[in-house]
């Protein structure tokens, strides 16, 4: 069974349930009233996860999470705005690249890949540059698994009268964010992460007042969130062809999310997965890149074995043959690999993955296990 359908221990796409996959077996008309109701129900449920119905709109968008990040920046940052991009990994760098391509002025503040950005850093930077209008933060940086201190940073940004854009791609649905307690202009996530849907749809929780003022900002017709929301509010429909099967799968995944116990239960399962993984790898002598205090239970980066017989490609293929898909490292300074803790998997699956890694490293005659 594993050879035919390996378990994806990746940060998305990830392993989905049979019920979620089954939901994609039905074809939907994009203008059909039942599909419009499905979209509306989806947005309502997503808003409830962040307690955001009174303050934010949920604007869905076709495409991957990066599409939604670009749409949020392009729509909510005025053309004469300036973004402070906080970076401690590859996805922070991607936000900076988006700003560059869109022609939005920006500055960056980069810390080491194992160092969270601090609220004190942000306060100092905002006071030094009054031209900054927005701050972009990666909540959980998927390239390492590091968790940045969102509530503290958000408080500083609000106190300085600036606006916050949160890339919560890898954290939404598993790590709590309350829109009534954490001030933000936009929080961005996607279907194929902690909600355990399939890839193909992003969504942006945009502050109602900010979205209303955003007409004319967007660089792109397709990525104009203000226009997307206005059209949906008026007609109930998507402006352009919606990812119907992805929407249906996510709606079904959300039913299972609530059946499981919502965010607390999803967080606990992922935390159990993470603890099983960390403990098991430690017994093999494989060290995690991050200290536990800043390790989110989403994806774990491990130092690669130093033995010269270790080669990631061979390691990957051998572990895959045993039924598990791992992820390459994304760090530039040290050789690593990554193992995701999210998806329709349990601590039993994680232990089986650790056992597979142990057997593979023994077969490769890698010595430091």
Image (tube, grey):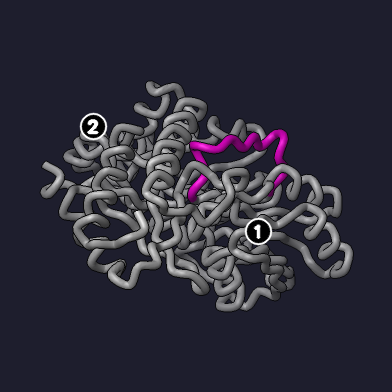
Residue 250 visible within the image: yes
Q: Position of residue 114 (x, y in %)?
A: 60, 59
Which of the 4 quarters of the picture holds residue 362?
A: bottom left
Extent of the magenta region = 170-184
User: What residue does disc 2 label?
Assistant: 19
Residue situated furthest front in the rendering: 367
Horizontal side of residue 173 vs 346, given as left or right: right
Q: In the rendered structure, does residue 354 fall within the stretch colored magenta?
A: no
* Helix, strand or loop under label 2: helix
* Observer-nearest of 168 and 27: 168
Name the chief secondary structure element in magenta.
loop
Horizontal side of residue 9 vs 136, given as left or right: left
Q: Position of residue 350 (x, y in %)?
A: 33, 39
Which dot, 1 or 2, sits closer to the camera? 1
**Residue at 22% across, 41% down:** 24
Residue 267 vertical position relative to residue 140 in the rendered view, above or below: above
């Amino acid at each position: 069974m594993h050879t035919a359908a390996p378990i994806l221990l990746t940060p998305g796409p990830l392993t989905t349930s049979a019920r979620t996959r089954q939901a994609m077996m039905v074809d939907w008309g994009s203008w059909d009233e039942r599909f419009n109701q499905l979209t509306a129900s989806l947005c309502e449920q997503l808003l409830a996860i962040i307690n955001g119905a009174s303050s934010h709109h949920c604007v869905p968008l076709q495409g991957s999470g990066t599409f939604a990040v670009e749409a949020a920046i392009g729509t909510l940052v005025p053309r004469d705005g300036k973004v402070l991009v906080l970076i401690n990994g590859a996805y922070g760098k991607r936000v900076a690249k988006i700003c560059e391509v869109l022609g939005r002025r920006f500055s960056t503040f980069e810390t080491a890949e194992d160092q969270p950005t601090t609220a004190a850093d942000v306060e100092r930077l905002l006071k030094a540059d009054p031209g900054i209008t927005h701050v972009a933060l990666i909540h959980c940086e998927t390239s390492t698994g590091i968790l940045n201190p969102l509530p503290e940073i958000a408080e500083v940004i609000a106190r300085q009268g600036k606006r916050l854009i949160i890339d919560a791609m890898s954290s939404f649905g598993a790590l709590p964010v309350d829109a009534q307690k954490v001030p933000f202009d936009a929080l961005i996530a996607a279907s194929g992460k902690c909600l355990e849907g399939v890839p193909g749809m992003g969504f942006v929780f945009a502050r109602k007042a900010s979205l209303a003022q955003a007409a004319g900002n967007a660089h792109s017709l397709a990525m104009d969130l203000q226009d997307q929301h206005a059209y949906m509010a008026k007609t109930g429909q998507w402006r352009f062809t919606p990812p119907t099967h992805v929407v249906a799968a996510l709606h079904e995944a959300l039913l299972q999310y609530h059946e499981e116990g919502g965010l607390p239960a999803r967080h606990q399962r992922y935390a159990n997965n993470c603890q099983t993984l960390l403990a098991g790898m430690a017994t093999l002598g494989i060290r995690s890149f991050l200290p536990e205090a800043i390790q989110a239970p989403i994806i774990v980066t491990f130092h690669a074995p130093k033995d010269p017989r270790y080669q990631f490609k061979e390691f990957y293929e051998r572990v895959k043959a045993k039924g598990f898909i791992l992820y390459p490292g994304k760090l530039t300074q040290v050789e690593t690999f990554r193992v995701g803790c999210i998806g329709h998997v349990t601590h039993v699956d994680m232990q089986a993955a650790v056992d597979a890694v142990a057997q593979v490293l023994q077969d490769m005659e890698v010595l430091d296990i």
